[in-house]
Image (cartoon, grey):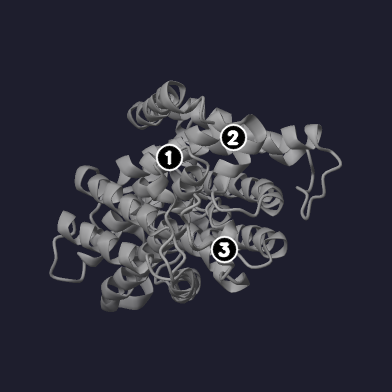
Amino acid sequence: MGRDQPVELRRDLGPWAAASLVVGTIIGTGIFLKTATMAQVGGSALWVLAAWTTAGLLSLFGALTYAELGAMFPKAGGEYVFLRAGYGPAMGYLYAWNRFWIGSPGSIAAYAVGTTTFLGGVLPIDPDSKVVAVTLIAVFTGVNCLHVRAGGRLQTVLTVMKVVMIGGLAFGALFFAQGGDWSRVTDDRGFPGFSAFGAMVLAALWAYDGWNNLPMAAGEVRDPQRNLPRALIWGAIGVFVIYALVNLGYFHALPFAEIAAPSSTSIAQKTATQFLGGTAQAVLAAAMAISAISAMNGSMLTGARVPYAAASDGLAPKQLAHLAPGAAVPSTSVIVQGLIACGYALAGGFDELTDAVVFASWLFYALNAGTVLLLRIREPARERAFRVPGFPVVPVIFMALALLLLVNAIWTAPQASTLGLGVTAFGALVYAGFLRRRA
Protein backbone atom coordinates (compact mmCIF):
# COMPACT_ATOMS: atom_id res chain seq x y z
CA MET A 1 0.00 0.00 0.00
CA GLY A 2 1.24 3.50 -0.74
CA ARG A 3 2.69 5.62 2.07
CA ASP A 4 -0.12 8.15 1.72
CA GLN A 5 -2.85 5.68 2.71
CA PRO A 6 -4.29 6.49 6.15
CA VAL A 7 -6.46 3.40 6.41
CA GLU A 8 -6.23 -0.36 5.87
CA LEU A 9 -8.67 -3.06 4.80
CA ARG A 10 -10.75 -4.35 7.69
CA ARG A 11 -11.61 -7.98 8.35
CA ASP A 12 -15.34 -7.39 8.68
CA LEU A 13 -16.66 -10.32 6.58
CA GLY A 14 -17.73 -13.14 8.91
CA PRO A 15 -18.39 -16.79 7.97
CA TRP A 16 -21.96 -16.19 6.80
CA ALA A 17 -20.98 -13.23 4.64
CA ALA A 18 -18.09 -15.27 3.20
CA ALA A 19 -20.36 -18.21 2.37
CA SER A 20 -22.95 -15.84 0.89
CA LEU A 21 -20.28 -14.37 -1.39
CA VAL A 22 -19.47 -17.86 -2.70
CA VAL A 23 -23.07 -19.04 -3.20
CA GLY A 24 -24.43 -15.65 -4.19
CA THR A 25 -21.73 -14.95 -6.76
CA ILE A 26 -22.02 -18.41 -8.34
CA ILE A 27 -25.81 -18.51 -8.65
CA GLY A 28 -26.66 -15.71 -11.02
CA THR A 29 -28.30 -15.99 -14.43
CA GLY A 30 -26.87 -19.20 -15.88
CA ILE A 31 -29.13 -21.69 -14.12
CA PHE A 32 -32.17 -19.94 -15.65
CA LEU A 33 -30.84 -19.49 -19.18
CA LYS A 34 -28.07 -21.91 -20.10
CA THR A 35 -29.98 -25.23 -20.00
CA ALA A 36 -31.98 -24.27 -23.09
CA THR A 37 -28.82 -23.29 -24.98
CA MET A 38 -27.16 -26.56 -23.96
CA ALA A 39 -30.22 -28.58 -25.03
CA GLN A 40 -30.03 -27.06 -28.50
CA VAL A 41 -26.42 -28.26 -28.78
CA GLY A 42 -26.62 -31.59 -26.94
CA GLY A 43 -29.80 -33.06 -28.37
CA SER A 44 -30.87 -35.06 -25.29
CA ALA A 45 -31.54 -34.59 -21.60
CA LEU A 46 -29.00 -37.17 -20.44
CA TRP A 47 -26.05 -35.42 -22.09
CA VAL A 48 -27.16 -31.98 -20.94
CA LEU A 49 -27.25 -33.31 -17.37
CA ALA A 50 -23.85 -34.94 -17.92
CA ALA A 51 -22.42 -31.59 -19.01
CA TRP A 52 -23.84 -29.88 -15.91
CA THR A 53 -22.31 -32.62 -13.73
CA THR A 54 -18.91 -32.32 -15.43
CA ALA A 55 -18.91 -28.54 -14.98
CA GLY A 56 -19.93 -28.92 -11.33
CA LEU A 57 -17.18 -31.42 -10.53
CA LEU A 58 -14.63 -29.30 -12.36
CA SER A 59 -15.67 -26.26 -10.32
CA LEU A 60 -15.54 -28.27 -7.08
CA PHE A 61 -11.99 -29.39 -7.89
CA GLY A 62 -11.15 -25.75 -8.51
CA ALA A 63 -12.68 -24.68 -5.19
CA LEU A 64 -10.62 -27.34 -3.35
CA THR A 65 -7.47 -26.07 -5.04
CA TYR A 66 -8.24 -22.44 -4.24
CA ALA A 67 -9.04 -23.33 -0.63
CA GLU A 68 -5.40 -24.34 -0.09
CA LEU A 69 -4.08 -21.22 -1.79
CA GLY A 70 -6.55 -18.89 -0.07
CA ALA A 71 -5.62 -20.18 3.38
CA MET A 72 -1.93 -19.72 2.53
CA PHE A 73 -2.34 -16.17 1.20
CA PRO A 74 -5.26 -14.49 3.02
CA LYS A 75 -4.69 -11.17 1.26
CA ALA A 76 -6.68 -8.95 -1.06
CA GLY A 77 -6.31 -9.90 -4.71
CA GLY A 78 -6.94 -13.66 -4.74
CA GLU A 79 -5.51 -15.16 -7.91
CA TYR A 80 -3.27 -12.15 -8.46
CA VAL A 81 -1.49 -13.04 -5.21
CA PHE A 82 -1.45 -16.78 -6.00
CA LEU A 83 0.01 -16.37 -9.48
CA ARG A 84 2.59 -13.88 -8.29
CA ALA A 85 3.75 -16.37 -5.67
CA GLY A 86 3.80 -19.27 -8.13
CA TYR A 87 5.16 -17.75 -11.33
CA GLY A 88 6.37 -14.24 -10.48
CA PRO A 89 5.01 -10.71 -10.89
CA ALA A 90 4.52 -10.92 -14.67
CA MET A 91 1.88 -13.67 -14.45
CA GLY A 92 0.18 -11.98 -11.52
CA TYR A 93 -0.01 -8.79 -13.55
CA LEU A 94 -1.50 -10.55 -16.60
CA TYR A 95 -4.24 -11.97 -14.40
CA ALA A 96 -4.96 -8.57 -12.85
CA TRP A 97 -5.01 -7.04 -16.35
CA ASN A 98 -7.53 -9.62 -17.58
CA ARG A 99 -9.65 -9.33 -14.48
CA PHE A 100 -9.67 -5.54 -14.69
CA TRP A 101 -10.56 -5.33 -18.38
CA ILE A 102 -12.70 -8.46 -18.94
CA GLY A 103 -13.39 -10.74 -15.97
CA SER A 104 -15.00 -8.48 -13.37
CA PRO A 105 -16.64 -5.79 -15.55
CA GLY A 106 -17.77 -8.41 -18.09
CA SER A 107 -19.46 -10.44 -15.35
CA ILE A 108 -21.08 -7.36 -13.84
CA ALA A 109 -22.37 -6.26 -17.25
CA ALA A 110 -23.73 -9.73 -18.01
CA TYR A 111 -25.64 -9.79 -14.71
CA ALA A 112 -27.03 -6.32 -15.35
CA VAL A 113 -28.16 -7.29 -18.87
CA GLY A 114 -29.70 -10.51 -17.51
CA THR A 115 -31.54 -8.65 -14.73
CA THR A 116 -32.98 -6.20 -17.26
CA THR A 117 -34.20 -9.10 -19.40
CA PHE A 118 -35.92 -10.72 -16.42
CA LEU A 119 -37.59 -7.53 -15.25
CA GLY A 120 -38.79 -6.79 -18.77
CA GLY A 121 -41.11 -9.77 -18.57
CA VAL A 122 -43.23 -8.26 -15.79
CA LEU A 123 -42.50 -4.55 -15.64
CA PRO A 124 -43.23 -1.90 -18.27
CA ILE A 125 -39.60 -1.66 -19.38
CA ASP A 126 -37.79 -2.77 -22.49
CA PRO A 127 -36.07 -6.13 -21.73
CA ASP A 128 -33.18 -4.97 -23.94
CA SER A 129 -32.92 -1.55 -22.29
CA LYS A 130 -29.31 -0.41 -21.93
CA VAL A 131 -30.42 2.43 -19.66
CA VAL A 132 -31.82 0.04 -17.04
CA ALA A 133 -28.69 -2.13 -17.14
CA VAL A 134 -26.39 0.87 -16.70
CA THR A 135 -28.59 2.23 -13.89
CA LEU A 136 -28.34 -1.06 -12.01
CA ILE A 137 -24.57 -1.01 -12.32
CA ALA A 138 -24.42 2.59 -11.09
CA VAL A 139 -26.64 1.95 -8.05
CA PHE A 140 -24.75 -1.11 -6.85
CA THR A 141 -21.40 0.52 -7.53
CA GLY A 142 -22.53 3.19 -5.08
CA VAL A 143 -23.52 0.55 -2.50
CA ASN A 144 -20.08 -1.07 -2.75
CA CYS A 145 -18.36 2.26 -2.08
CA LEU A 146 -19.83 2.06 1.43
CA HIS A 147 -18.34 0.03 4.28
CA VAL A 148 -17.56 -3.58 3.26
CA ARG A 149 -19.84 -4.74 6.07
CA ALA A 150 -22.78 -3.13 4.23
CA GLY A 151 -21.94 -5.00 1.03
CA GLY A 152 -21.54 -8.24 2.99
CA ARG A 153 -24.87 -7.88 4.76
CA LEU A 154 -26.66 -7.06 1.52
CA GLN A 155 -25.04 -10.10 -0.06
CA THR A 156 -26.23 -12.38 2.76
CA VAL A 157 -29.83 -11.14 2.50
CA LEU A 158 -29.94 -11.44 -1.29
CA THR A 159 -28.35 -14.91 -1.23
CA VAL A 160 -30.83 -16.27 1.34
CA MET A 161 -33.74 -14.88 -0.69
CA LYS A 162 -32.64 -16.41 -3.95
CA VAL A 163 -31.73 -19.82 -2.49
CA VAL A 164 -35.24 -20.05 -1.02
CA MET A 165 -36.83 -19.05 -4.34
CA ILE A 166 -34.68 -21.40 -6.45
CA GLY A 167 -35.27 -24.21 -3.97
CA GLY A 168 -38.99 -23.61 -4.39
CA LEU A 169 -38.64 -23.80 -8.18
CA ALA A 170 -36.85 -27.15 -7.94
CA PHE A 171 -39.34 -28.57 -5.41
CA GLY A 172 -42.37 -27.51 -7.43
CA ALA A 173 -40.95 -28.84 -10.70
CA LEU A 174 -40.03 -32.20 -9.18
CA PHE A 175 -43.22 -32.88 -7.25
CA PHE A 176 -46.07 -30.68 -8.47
CA ALA A 177 -45.55 -30.13 -12.21
CA GLN A 178 -48.62 -31.02 -14.27
CA GLY A 179 -47.78 -33.72 -16.77
CA GLY A 180 -44.35 -34.38 -15.26
CA ASP A 181 -42.60 -37.45 -16.62
CA TRP A 182 -39.44 -39.01 -15.12
CA SER A 183 -38.62 -40.85 -18.36
CA ARG A 184 -37.64 -37.50 -19.89
CA VAL A 185 -34.72 -37.22 -17.47
CA THR A 186 -32.98 -40.31 -18.86
CA ASP A 187 -33.69 -39.51 -22.51
CA ASP A 188 -30.54 -40.38 -24.50
CA ARG A 189 -30.30 -39.82 -28.24
CA GLY A 190 -26.60 -40.55 -28.50
CA PHE A 191 -23.37 -38.74 -27.64
CA PRO A 192 -23.35 -35.37 -29.44
CA GLY A 193 -19.58 -35.40 -30.02
CA PHE A 194 -16.67 -34.04 -28.01
CA SER A 195 -16.80 -30.58 -29.54
CA ALA A 196 -20.52 -30.17 -28.78
CA PHE A 197 -20.10 -31.63 -25.30
CA GLY A 198 -17.24 -29.20 -24.62
CA ALA A 199 -19.43 -26.31 -25.76
CA MET A 200 -22.15 -27.44 -23.33
CA VAL A 201 -19.65 -27.65 -20.47
CA LEU A 202 -18.40 -24.15 -21.34
CA ALA A 203 -21.98 -22.86 -21.16
CA ALA A 204 -22.57 -24.56 -17.80
CA LEU A 205 -19.32 -23.16 -16.42
CA TRP A 206 -20.76 -19.65 -16.71
CA ALA A 207 -23.48 -20.76 -14.30
CA TYR A 208 -20.78 -22.11 -11.93
CA ASP A 209 -18.41 -19.18 -12.36
CA GLY A 210 -17.81 -17.25 -9.15
CA TRP A 211 -16.40 -19.92 -6.83
CA ASN A 212 -13.02 -18.20 -7.29
CA ASN A 213 -14.21 -14.76 -6.18
CA LEU A 214 -14.05 -15.01 -2.39
CA PRO A 215 -10.20 -15.14 -2.20
CA MET A 216 -10.12 -11.73 -3.94
CA ALA A 217 -11.60 -10.30 -0.74
CA ALA A 218 -9.57 -12.54 1.60
CA GLY A 219 -8.01 -9.46 3.18
CA GLU A 220 -11.43 -8.62 4.64
CA VAL A 221 -12.47 -12.11 5.83
CA ARG A 222 -12.28 -12.81 9.56
CA ASP A 223 -10.18 -15.85 10.56
CA PRO A 224 -9.46 -16.57 6.86
CA GLN A 225 -7.47 -19.77 7.42
CA ARG A 226 -10.64 -21.32 8.79
CA ASN A 227 -13.53 -19.45 7.19
CA LEU A 228 -12.23 -19.16 3.64
CA PRO A 229 -11.74 -22.91 2.90
CA ARG A 230 -15.04 -23.80 4.55
CA ALA A 231 -16.97 -21.16 2.61
CA LEU A 232 -15.37 -22.16 -0.70
CA ILE A 233 -15.90 -25.91 -0.36
CA TRP A 234 -19.34 -26.01 1.22
CA GLY A 235 -20.54 -23.19 -1.00
CA ALA A 236 -19.46 -25.07 -4.14
CA ILE A 237 -21.08 -28.30 -2.91
CA GLY A 238 -24.30 -26.49 -2.03
CA VAL A 239 -24.56 -24.92 -5.48
CA PHE A 240 -23.83 -28.30 -7.12
CA VAL A 241 -26.80 -29.82 -5.27
CA ILE A 242 -29.11 -26.88 -6.08
CA TYR A 243 -28.22 -26.99 -9.78
CA ALA A 244 -28.73 -30.74 -9.96
CA LEU A 245 -32.21 -30.48 -8.45
CA VAL A 246 -33.23 -27.56 -10.67
CA ASN A 247 -32.09 -29.26 -13.88
CA LEU A 248 -33.78 -32.51 -12.95
CA GLY A 249 -36.91 -30.44 -12.35
CA TYR A 250 -36.66 -28.84 -15.80
CA PHE A 251 -36.52 -32.16 -17.63
CA HIS A 252 -39.16 -33.76 -15.41
CA ALA A 253 -41.63 -30.92 -15.94
CA LEU A 254 -41.19 -30.20 -19.66
CA PRO A 255 -40.71 -32.17 -22.89
CA PHE A 256 -37.19 -31.87 -24.28
CA ALA A 257 -38.42 -30.20 -27.47
CA GLU A 258 -40.00 -27.39 -25.46
CA ILE A 259 -36.79 -26.87 -23.47
CA ALA A 260 -34.66 -26.69 -26.63
CA ALA A 261 -37.05 -24.49 -28.61
CA PRO A 262 -35.82 -20.89 -29.06
CA SER A 263 -38.06 -18.61 -27.02
CA SER A 264 -38.15 -15.24 -25.34
CA THR A 265 -39.44 -17.01 -22.22
CA SER A 266 -36.75 -18.54 -20.01
CA ILE A 267 -36.75 -22.26 -19.30
CA ALA A 268 -37.31 -21.48 -15.60
CA GLN A 269 -40.47 -19.53 -16.38
CA LYS A 270 -41.77 -22.28 -18.67
CA THR A 271 -41.18 -24.79 -15.88
CA ALA A 272 -42.87 -22.68 -13.22
CA THR A 273 -46.06 -22.39 -15.28
CA GLN A 274 -46.46 -26.15 -14.83
CA PHE A 275 -47.17 -25.74 -11.12
CA LEU A 276 -47.76 -22.01 -10.52
CA GLY A 277 -50.06 -21.30 -13.45
CA GLY A 278 -50.56 -17.65 -14.35
CA THR A 279 -48.53 -16.31 -11.42
CA ALA A 280 -45.34 -17.99 -12.66
CA GLN A 281 -44.21 -15.11 -14.85
CA ALA A 282 -44.11 -12.55 -12.04
CA VAL A 283 -42.73 -14.90 -9.38
CA LEU A 284 -39.92 -16.22 -11.56
CA ALA A 285 -39.04 -12.79 -12.88
CA ALA A 286 -38.57 -11.59 -9.31
CA ALA A 287 -36.53 -14.67 -8.38
CA MET A 288 -34.28 -14.36 -11.41
CA ALA A 289 -33.79 -10.64 -10.93
CA ILE A 290 -32.82 -11.10 -7.27
CA SER A 291 -30.46 -13.91 -8.27
CA ALA A 292 -28.71 -11.82 -10.92
CA ILE A 293 -28.49 -8.74 -8.68
CA SER A 294 -26.98 -10.82 -5.87
CA ALA A 295 -24.31 -12.20 -8.22
CA MET A 296 -23.62 -8.71 -9.57
CA ASN A 297 -23.17 -7.31 -6.07
CA GLY A 298 -20.80 -10.13 -5.12
CA SER A 299 -18.75 -9.64 -8.28
CA MET A 300 -18.46 -5.92 -7.60
CA LEU A 301 -17.34 -6.41 -4.01
CA THR A 302 -14.69 -9.02 -4.78
CA GLY A 303 -13.54 -7.93 -8.24
CA ALA A 304 -12.47 -4.45 -7.17
CA ARG A 305 -9.90 -5.94 -4.78
CA VAL A 306 -7.75 -7.25 -7.66
CA PRO A 307 -6.74 -3.88 -9.18
CA TYR A 308 -6.40 -2.61 -5.60
CA ALA A 309 -3.81 -5.33 -4.88
CA ALA A 310 -1.94 -4.73 -8.15
CA ALA A 311 -1.86 -0.99 -7.52
CA SER A 312 -0.60 -1.57 -3.98
CA ASP A 313 2.36 -3.41 -5.53
CA GLY A 314 3.03 -0.58 -7.99
CA LEU A 315 1.75 -2.49 -11.04
CA ALA A 316 -1.31 -0.30 -11.67
CA PRO A 317 -2.11 3.40 -11.20
CA LYS A 318 -1.73 4.22 -7.51
CA GLN A 319 -5.20 5.77 -7.41
CA LEU A 320 -6.69 2.27 -7.64
CA ALA A 321 -5.12 1.47 -4.27
CA HIS A 322 -6.87 4.40 -2.59
CA LEU A 323 -9.02 3.39 0.38
CA ALA A 324 -11.88 5.69 1.28
CA PRO A 325 -11.38 7.07 4.80
CA GLY A 326 -13.97 5.72 7.19
CA ALA A 327 -15.34 3.12 4.77
CA ALA A 328 -11.93 1.45 4.25
CA VAL A 329 -12.91 0.15 0.80
CA PRO A 330 -11.03 0.67 -2.51
CA SER A 331 -13.64 3.12 -3.76
CA THR A 332 -11.68 4.32 -6.80
CA SER A 333 -11.23 0.74 -7.96
CA VAL A 334 -14.95 0.08 -7.43
CA ILE A 335 -15.95 3.15 -9.46
CA VAL A 336 -13.58 2.48 -12.37
CA GLN A 337 -14.74 -1.15 -12.46
CA GLY A 338 -18.34 0.08 -12.67
CA LEU A 339 -17.56 2.47 -15.52
CA ILE A 340 -15.95 -0.30 -17.59
CA ALA A 341 -18.92 -2.57 -16.84
CA CYS A 342 -21.27 0.15 -18.12
CA GLY A 343 -19.31 0.19 -21.38
CA TYR A 344 -19.69 -3.57 -21.77
CA ALA A 345 -23.40 -3.40 -20.96
CA LEU A 346 -23.88 -0.80 -23.70
CA ALA A 347 -21.88 -2.76 -26.26
CA GLY A 348 -22.54 -6.48 -25.79
CA GLY A 349 -25.27 -9.11 -25.49
CA PHE A 350 -25.59 -11.70 -22.74
CA ASP A 351 -24.08 -14.75 -24.45
CA GLU A 352 -21.17 -12.80 -25.97
CA LEU A 353 -20.28 -11.37 -22.56
CA THR A 354 -20.48 -14.69 -20.72
CA ASP A 355 -18.39 -16.60 -23.28
CA ALA A 356 -15.63 -13.98 -23.17
CA VAL A 357 -15.60 -13.96 -19.35
CA VAL A 358 -15.48 -17.75 -19.05
CA PHE A 359 -12.60 -18.16 -21.52
CA ALA A 360 -10.49 -15.40 -19.96
CA SER A 361 -11.16 -16.74 -16.45
CA TRP A 362 -10.38 -20.40 -17.12
CA LEU A 363 -7.06 -19.53 -18.72
CA PHE A 364 -5.88 -18.44 -15.27
CA TYR A 365 -7.77 -21.07 -13.28
CA ALA A 366 -5.58 -23.68 -14.99
CA LEU A 367 -2.43 -21.75 -14.11
CA ASN A 368 -3.50 -21.47 -10.47
CA ALA A 369 -3.79 -25.24 -10.23
CA GLY A 370 -0.17 -25.26 -11.34
CA THR A 371 0.63 -22.83 -8.52
CA VAL A 372 -0.46 -25.42 -5.95
CA LEU A 373 1.84 -28.00 -7.55
CA LEU A 374 4.79 -25.59 -7.78
CA LEU A 375 4.51 -24.44 -4.16
CA ARG A 376 4.23 -28.01 -2.87
CA ILE A 377 7.52 -28.76 -4.67
CA ARG A 378 9.34 -25.56 -3.75
CA GLU A 379 8.07 -25.21 -0.18
CA PRO A 380 7.09 -28.68 1.05
CA ALA A 381 7.62 -27.80 4.73
CA ARG A 382 5.49 -24.67 4.64
CA GLU A 383 2.57 -24.67 7.07
CA ARG A 384 -0.75 -25.06 5.28
CA ALA A 385 -4.02 -24.52 7.14
CA PHE A 386 -5.82 -26.53 4.45
CA ARG A 387 -4.46 -29.11 2.01
CA VAL A 388 -6.17 -30.22 -1.20
CA PRO A 389 -7.56 -33.75 -0.59
CA GLY A 390 -6.37 -36.28 -3.12
CA PHE A 391 -3.25 -34.28 -3.97
CA PRO A 392 -1.85 -34.23 -6.64
CA VAL A 393 -4.73 -35.91 -8.49
CA VAL A 394 -7.33 -33.19 -7.91
CA PRO A 395 -5.27 -30.19 -9.11
CA VAL A 396 -3.78 -32.20 -12.01
CA ILE A 397 -7.22 -33.31 -13.25
CA PHE A 398 -8.53 -29.78 -12.84
CA MET A 399 -5.64 -28.29 -14.80
CA ALA A 400 -5.80 -30.91 -17.57
CA LEU A 401 -9.55 -30.56 -18.08
CA ALA A 402 -9.33 -26.77 -17.96
CA LEU A 403 -6.71 -26.81 -20.74
CA LEU A 404 -8.84 -29.17 -22.85
CA LEU A 405 -11.80 -26.90 -22.33
CA LEU A 406 -9.79 -23.88 -23.49
CA VAL A 407 -8.64 -25.67 -26.65
CA ASN A 408 -12.23 -26.65 -27.41
CA ALA A 409 -13.40 -23.09 -26.74
CA ILE A 410 -10.94 -21.74 -29.31
CA TRP A 411 -12.56 -24.09 -31.84
CA THR A 412 -16.22 -23.60 -30.91
CA ALA A 413 -16.21 -19.95 -29.73
CA PRO A 414 -13.42 -18.28 -31.72
CA GLN A 415 -14.68 -14.72 -31.28
CA ALA A 416 -14.79 -14.87 -27.48
CA SER A 417 -11.49 -16.78 -27.38
CA THR A 418 -9.81 -14.25 -29.62
CA LEU A 419 -10.98 -11.43 -27.34
CA GLY A 420 -9.53 -13.18 -24.29
CA LEU A 421 -6.22 -14.01 -25.95
CA GLY A 422 -5.94 -10.56 -27.53
CA VAL A 423 -6.48 -8.73 -24.25
CA THR A 424 -3.91 -11.01 -22.56
CA ALA A 425 -1.34 -10.40 -25.31
CA PHE A 426 -1.85 -6.63 -25.07
CA GLY A 427 -1.36 -6.84 -21.30
CA ALA A 428 1.93 -8.68 -21.85
CA LEU A 429 3.13 -5.87 -24.13
CA VAL A 430 2.19 -3.23 -21.54
CA TYR A 431 4.03 -5.14 -18.82
CA ALA A 432 7.15 -5.70 -20.92
CA GLY A 433 7.27 -2.10 -22.09
CA PHE A 434 6.46 -0.19 -18.91
CA LEU A 435 6.34 -2.35 -15.77
CA ARG A 436 8.97 -5.11 -15.93
CA ARG A 437 11.71 -3.06 -14.27
CA ARG A 438 9.36 -1.72 -11.62
CA ALA A 439 8.24 -5.27 -10.73
Image: 286 above or below 71 = below
Q: In the shown orientation, is residue 172 left or right of residue 341?
A: right
Q: Residue at 29% x, 47% y: name it.
A: 340
Any part of residue 410 in sight: yes
Frontmost residue, 217 versus 358: 217
Number of the front mark, 1 or 2: 1
Percent position of residue 410, x then y: 43, 25
Amino acid type indicated by mark 1: Ala
Residue at the image position 78 percent from the left and 48 percent from the top: 389
Residue depicted at 28% across the width and 59% down the height: 137
Per the image, the residue denoted by label 3 is: 220
**Residue 46 image point, x, y percent:** 53, 47
Answer with mark 1 or mark 2, whichever residue precedes in sequence.
Answer: 1
Work out which quarter of the rendered image holds the C terminus and state it.
top right
Query: Which residue is disc 2 drawn over?
Result: 366
- Residue 258 seen in this snapshot: no
- Residue 377 vs 278, above or below: the answer is above
Q: Is residue 57 left or right of residue 287?
A: right
Residue 400 spot, x, y in % from top left: 64, 30
Amino acid type, callout 2: Ala
Instruction: Name the residue nearer the viewer: 75 or 44.
Output: 75
The tag on residue 316 is: 1
Counting from the top left corner in percent of width and height, residue 64 is at 68, 50
Q: Would you call the spot at circle 1 few (<14 residues within 10 Å), some (14-19), or many (20 or more)? A: some
Q: In the rendered structure, are the residues bearing label 1 and label 3 in contact, judged by CB atoms less than 8 Å apart?
A: no
Q: Reply above or below: 69 against 159.
A: above
Q: Residues within 10 Å of mark 3 (few under 14, many from 20)?
A: many
Furthest-front residue in view?
A: 3
Q: Based on the displayed image, in which of its 4 quarters is residue 267 positioned?
A: bottom left
Q: Tell me the kind of residue under disc 3.
A: Glu
Horizontal placement of 38 versus 348: left or right?
A: right
Query: How far, Cα to Cα, is label 1 from label 3?
Result: 21 Å
